[in-house]
Amino acid sequence: MKFSQRKSGSRSGIDMAPIVDVIFNLLIFFALTLNFAISSGIKVNLPKATGEIVEIKDVNIHIAKDGKVYFNDMLMRSERSLKREFEKIPNKDTLVIIRADSQAMHGPVVSTMDLAKTQGFSKIAIGVEPKR
């Protein structure tokens, strides 16, 4: 029995053609699935606005240990003044965050939540500090 010896010049290796095909197919796939911003072919001159840009902010209500209510750092002397501040906000989707002291009575917290709800605000959150 005669065994053939390997020639020193031939080398075996990994065929790179399938890998290159897969890479190109992936590249084409991702290029075609990108959402391109297509601008309209019609030229439109948009009107200029003279008003200021209205920035939507959260409403922060702080309730101190002694029951005093602060609306965005302004002391509210009565529930009527708090109601007026709520009425000044045109966007009822604004988030109302109530941050009450841990020693505060629950009465002012509940009445503030109720007032916000009756004024049309549906996004009401209770502010807490995370435990460490």
Image (cartoon, grey):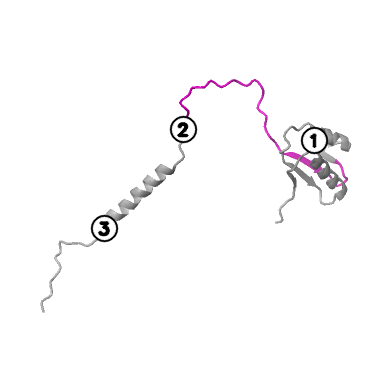
**Amino acid found under the numbered disc labelled 1:** Phe
Q: Residue 72's x, y, as percent?
A: 77, 37
Between the C-alphas of marks 3 and 2, the distance is 41 Å
**Residue at 43% in and 43% down:** 33
Residue lying farthest to the bottom in this orientation: 1
Residue 15 has which mark? 3
Q: Tell me if I can see residue 5 in this picture.
A: yes
Label placed on residue 86: 1
Q: Residues within 10 Å of mark 1 (few under 14, many from 20)?
A: some
- Range drawn in magenta: 39-68
Say which of marks 2 and 1 sits in front: 2
How packed mark 2 is, by other alpha carbons closer than 10 Å (few <14, some 14-19, many 20 or more), is few
Rendering quarter of residue 86? top right
Q: Residue 53 location in percent, x, y?
A: 65, 27
Q: Residue at x 24, y 60 (%)?
A: 13
| Res. 63 in view | no
- Quadrant of the rendering where the N terminus is positioned: bottom left
Between disc 1 and disc 3, whose residue precedes? Answer: 3
Indicate the quadrant where residue 19 lies: bottom left
Q: Is residue 44 found inside the magenta-colored segment of the image?
A: yes
Q: Secondary structure at mark 3?
A: loop
Residue in front for this viewpoint, 57 or 116: 116
- Going by the numbered disc 2, the residue's amino acid type is Ile
Q: Is residue 74 above or below residue 17?
A: above
Quarter of the rendering occupied by the C terminus = bottom right
Magenta portion: prevailing SS class: loop
